[in-house]
Amino acid sequence: MYPLHPNEVERLQALHDLEVFSSPAEPQYDAICRTAQALFGASIALVSLVGETEQRFKGRCGLNVSGTSREVSFCTYTILSDEVLVVEDALQDERFSASPLVAGEPHIRFYAGAPLVLRAGIHLGSLCLIDRVPRSFSAEQQEQLRDLAQIVVAQLRLSKAERKARESADDYRLLADNSSDLIIRSDLDGTRRYVSPAASRLLGYEARELLGTHPLASVHPDEASSYAQLLKQLEAGQISEAVTQQRYRRRDSSFVWVEISFSLTREEETGGPNGYVAIIRDISQRKAAESEMAQIARHDPLTGLPNRLHFREQLEQEIARTKRTSSTFALLCLDLDRFKLVNDTLGHQAGDRLLKVVAQRIKSVLRTEDTLARLGGDEFVIIQTNCARAEDASRLAERVIAAMLPPVDLGGYPAGVGVSIGIALAPQDSLDHDHLYALADQALYCAKAAGRNTFRLFAEEEVGSSGMSNQGGEWEVGQPLRQITPDPLLVGDLLRDILESSSDCMKLLDQEGNLLFLSAGGLKVMEIDDVGPFLGQSWVELWQGEHQAAAKDAVAQASRGQEARFRGFCHTAKGQPRWWDVALSPVKTSERRARSDLGDLARCHRSGRA
C-alpha cells in the first residue's frame, strides 16, 4: 500500500475544485516540460497530478503515456513533503527498486520531483524529471526545479480562470441583456448608441449614462493614443476585426483590465461600414494570475527582491545604457558573515526572518534607481547606478555595513550580523556581465579573507586601502563576556562564532572539559558574583553522582565533533540544587587563524523537572 498525504481528503478536494485533473490537454504544460527537459538535460519531464487512484500527466515531454496507477507512482512520495524528492538511483532505493517502472518502460533510474504546492499542506502533484541512468541533482538545481513548479501552480490557477471566462462567454452571448460581457454598439466615430446592462457590474455606470459618450473618455491615459489609432482604422474600414486589452475607468475612478473584441458592421444595401460592435470582458483575474507568474519567475519568494534572472536582466540593461550614454555604475557582491551558524543554531525559520530583515536594511540605504537582488542563500548583489567614482561605491558599502550593526530580534534572541562586500566598477573593470560579476566576487573573496564585515574593491590599487575594519555587527554573546575572557585572541574568535546572547547559561570549555568562560546569563542563573575562581576549573566535576559521568561522556562526544545532550543535577555557586537540560556543540576557530579544534560550547537551560 502506498503512503497517503496527511491532508489527503482536503488535497483531493482542492484538485477537484481546480477542475484540471480531467480537463483536456493544454500545450502550455508541455512547454514547461520542454523547458525543464532542456534546462536539466533530462530524458523525460512530466507535470503529474496525483488523484485518488491514479496520476495523470497534465504535461509531458519524452514519454508517450497519459498517466499511471498511483500504486507505482514516484510522485505519490513527492507530495508527502514540501521538499524536492531526489532518487539518484532507483535500483538502490527499496521504495522503488521493485517498481515495474524501473524494471520495465520507461526504465527509471533517476527521479527528481518538486511538489506542486497550491497552499500550505496542499500538494496537487509534482513537476518531475526522469532519466534512464543514475545521476546526482545539486541543491541549486533543486531550487530551479522548485521555481518551475511554482510557475506550473500559477498556470493551473490561470487555466481555471480562463476556462471560467470562456464558459461564461459561451453561456451569456445568447442574450445580450443578460450577458456578463459588456456589449456596445457604436457609430464609426465611436459614439455609443447601445450599451448592455452589464455596464453596471463592470464599470459601475447604468447603461443609459453611457449612451452618446465616446470610449476614449474611459480608457487609461497611458493607452489612449494606441486606442485612438485602432478606432481610426475601424472608422476608415482598414480593419474589420480587432482584439485589444485596455484599462477602463470605473465610476469610482479605479481601473479594471478588460479585453475588447471589435467587429465592424456594414450597411446591408451598400456594404459600406456603418459602425462596430464591441464586446468588453473583465480579464482582471487573468491579469492577476499573469502578474503572479511574472512575480514568481523573476523575484525571490522569501524577500520579494529580484532573483538571479531579474538581476541578470537589470545588469545587461545597465551595461547597454553605459555603452550608449558613457555612464558608469558599480556592482557590489554581498555575503552575510556566518549566516550558516544561524540556521544550524536557531533553525531555518530564524534564518528566514534574518534574511528578510537584512533585505529591508540594505534597501533602506539605497536610492530608488539602484537595484538589490538576492541570488540565493545569503548572497545579495547591488547595482549602483551613476557611480562616478570608486569613493561613491565605497561609501555605499560603508552604509550597508553600518546598517547591519543594530541587533536583530530572532524570537527573543537579539543579535547582529556582519556582511562582506566585493566591488567592481563599470566600465573601468569590465563591460561583460559575467566577467564583471566574477571580478566583484573576487573582491568579495578578498574582503572575507581580510577578516569579514568589511569591503574591498577589485582594482589592485584600491585593495590595500579600502574597507572597514571589523567593528561590531557580528554575532556576539553580550558585553559582560568581554570583561571575563582571559585570552583576547580567543575571545575575538568566540564572539564571531557564538550566535546570540540569552538568559541561558552558556559556557566555553576546552577539550578536557575545563571552563574557559561563562556568559552573562550564566553568571546570573549560576549565582556567581566573580567568575575568576571558576575559570580553568573542571566543569565536569560540578555535576553530582551519575550525572558527572554523563557530563564527561558529553564532553568527549563534543570533542569528537558531534552534538551532545543530557539532563543532569548540580548546585549553583550559592548551594541551590537545580536540574539542567544541557546541549554541547563543538566550536572551531575562525578562518583567519589556523583551523583547529577550539573546544566545546555548553548551553544549559533550567529544567522543568522538580
Image (tube, grey):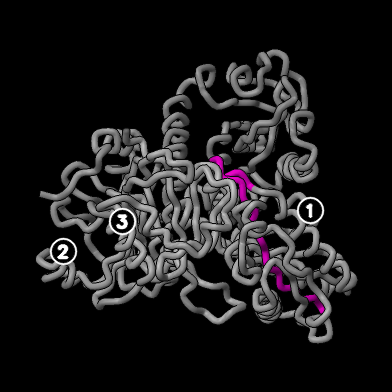
Element marked by disc 1 = loop
| Magenta stretch bounds | 408-427
Q: Earlier in the sequence, mark 2 or mark 1?
A: 2
Q: Amino acid at mark 3?
A: Gln
Q: Indicate left or right for 452 with 325 as reference.
A: left
Q: Residue at x 70, y 21 (%)?
A: 193
What x and y, as percent, mark residue 572? Answer: 45, 44
Task: Tell whether position 411 is magenta.
Answer: yes
Q: Amino acid at mark 2?
A: Phe
Element marked by disc 2 = loop
What x and y, as percent, mark residue 573? Answer: 48, 46
Q: Residue at x 36, y 61 (%)?
A: 563
Q: As rendered, which of 122 and 170 lies closer to the eye?
A: 122
Q: Which mark is residue 96?
A: 2
Instruction: Tell me if mark 3 has few (under 14), some (14-19) or many (20+) residues whose alpha carbon lies within 10 angstroms of its own.
Output: some
Q: As rendered, which of 317 and 408 lies closer to the eye?
A: 408
Q: Which mark is residue 294?
A: none
Give the residue pinned by disc 3.
Answer: 548
Give the residue pinned by disc 1.
Answer: 365
Q: Nearer the viewer, mark 2 or mark 1?
A: 1
Q: Are marks 1 and 3 in contact (CB under 8 Å)?
A: no
Q: Nearer the viewer, mark 1 or mark 3?
A: 3
Residue 89, relative to residue 298: is it above or below?
Answer: below
Q: Does any portion of residue 304 appear in the rendered image? A: no
Q: Are marks 2 and 3 in contact (CB under 8 Å)?
A: no
Q: Amino acid at mark 1?
A: Val
Q: Are marks 2 and 1 in contact (CB under 8 Å)?
A: no
Q: CA distance from mark 2 to mark 1?
A: 52 Å
